[in-house]
Image (cartoon, coloured by chain):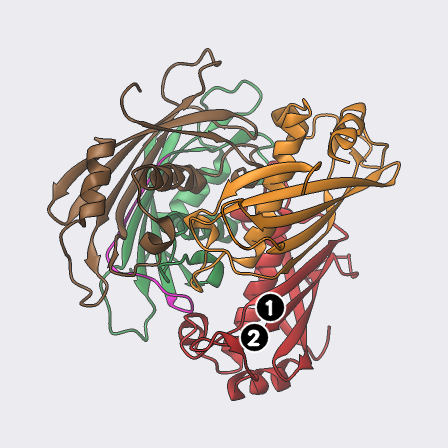
Chain colours: A orange, B brown, C green, D red
């Protein structure tokens, strides 16, 4: 959890379900927020990026493992590291921790997303843009 | 927008829909996040508060008006002010603005939520707790 | 609840929050589902309609009042009625009930959404399309 | 896709994001809806089950692979099959297809969820309840 990009997040009421803890699919939404924050921190304009003006970067795979429940108000830190899978695709590994004031130092969840770049005019795979390559250096 | 509680928020990809802007119901979820942040800032423990240990504070009414669309990556500020409606209920008024760097200085949305305190053992209305009265001073 | 369009819906786990009942903003999402079902039932192609190919119909106002909590697994019926507000805008009134097998016959929630038609090329207000006028006859 | 439990679902506007297709984490929420529908179809009371009165059945792992994008209004069918992993845990495999009228006959997405039974009084693992064992026969 030292050199990777870190995103701090408080668990919101909206994230929870009737079991009193974070709804499982929202665990992945929280990871996606960390990805968005890392894109912005590397200088990418989120509005242009997510409107798919030139390229789209859909998620082709996602997985998450939960080790501890997360409750409304819990303060967590998400670390993320990116890896190139091919010239057109990359993977992000996320680790979720309770924040520094917690006695729990092990990951409370781990997740993965895989992304493939698509040229929005041809709908075919294309290489990562220069912006994304710069972001990868920032998050490796 | 000067003396009220202010919550800063970036619009997330998850907040948006296929029209490219914030899904209307998520506008209210974002306001609820501002409410949660104000509760925490006034010293309330969110985990205990939202698990409904002693009292529950369900929303009985919510409304929102949109004046401008919000896109993924937009940075907004939400101001909120609370008003006592009765010994058992209160209202929150929210105003959403683009952040200071924007040239748009008018509210981009306004919302209201009304809340009633319920004793979780009897399921009957009850007076606001001391914690909530302190929060009201903090957000009036 | 006799002649208006009726949409049947089971409350999903995803709709709920840590208070054990439907998260307030999801009450409006459920109403929007009823609106989508009524559009499809009147013959409108949802994919084309919501991609905003010719016109977009953003929500400018939404409100909801809750009279009873809704739990995961509850079966509800949503009735909706549309009203023309101007040549460019309309309102939908929703009433939510527990389904016929319930002894509770009063509305458990009521909601309103207001919609304005926008020409997606000029970004200016425009008249309701013929499709929407046909849908209004179907839901009046 | 013949003998397994089938859940029919229309893609809602709320499921989509600014890329115009289903937000990735909502793909898993849609699978969870199919799980809920299968529980109800096997005779389980969803309200009691998801309030965690006797046992809770949290998700410990979830994964999803996307092969085709899903748009608002698309009609899909989700098939699910359950497998016992241990006396205390089970796995569900989901396959998502476009509905019968579509020319696309291959799965558009596949997902997995793993669930572990917890005794809510002791917070320890416990065996599957009789209700869940009956549900497993129903979905094997």
Task: Give x and y (percent) for residue D74.
Answer: 63, 52
Provide the residue span drawn in magenta.
Answer: C61-75
CB atoms at circles 1 and 2 under 8 Å apart?
A: yes
Graded by Cα atoms within 10 Å as few (under 14), some (14 to 19) or many (20 or more), the crowding at tag 1 reads: some
Q: Residue furthest top?
A: B103
Residue identified by numbered label 2: D38
Specify whether disc 1 shares its chain with disc 2.
Answer: yes
Residue identified by numbered label 1: D7
D65 vs A41, nearest the viewer: A41
Task: Give x and y (percent) for residue C77.
Answer: 36, 62
Which is in the foreground here, disc 1 or disc 2?
2
Name the chain letter of the residue that bears numbered label 2.
D
Q: Is residue D72 visible?
A: no
Secondary structure under the numbered disc 2 in the rendered image: helix
As drawn, A5 above or below C110: above
Q: Residue at x 64, y 26 (%)?
A: A41
Q: Residue at x 53, y 30 (%)?
A: C55
Q: Is residue B106 visible?
A: yes
D78 vs B82, nearest the viewer: B82
B8 vs C69, nearest the viewer: B8
Distance of mark 1 from mark 2, alpha carbons? 8 Å
């Amino acid at each position: 959890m030292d050199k990777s990009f870190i995103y701090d997040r408080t668990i919101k009421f909206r994230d929870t379900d009737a079991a009193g803890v974070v709804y499982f699919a929202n665990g992945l939404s929280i990871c996606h927020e960390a990805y968005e924050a890392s894109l912005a921190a590397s200088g990418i304009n989120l509005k242009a990026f997510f409107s798919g003006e030139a390229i789209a970067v859909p998620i082709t795979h996602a997985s998450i493992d939960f080790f501890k429940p997360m409750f409304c108000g819990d303060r967590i830190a998400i670390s993320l590291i990116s890896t190139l899978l091919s010239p057109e695709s990359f993977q992000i590994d996320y680790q979720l921790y309770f924040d520094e004031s917690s006695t729990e130092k092990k990951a409370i969840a781990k997740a993965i997303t895989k992304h493939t770049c698509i040229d929005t005019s041809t709908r075919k795979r294309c290489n990562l843009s220069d912006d994304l390559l710069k972001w990868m250096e920032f998050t490796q």
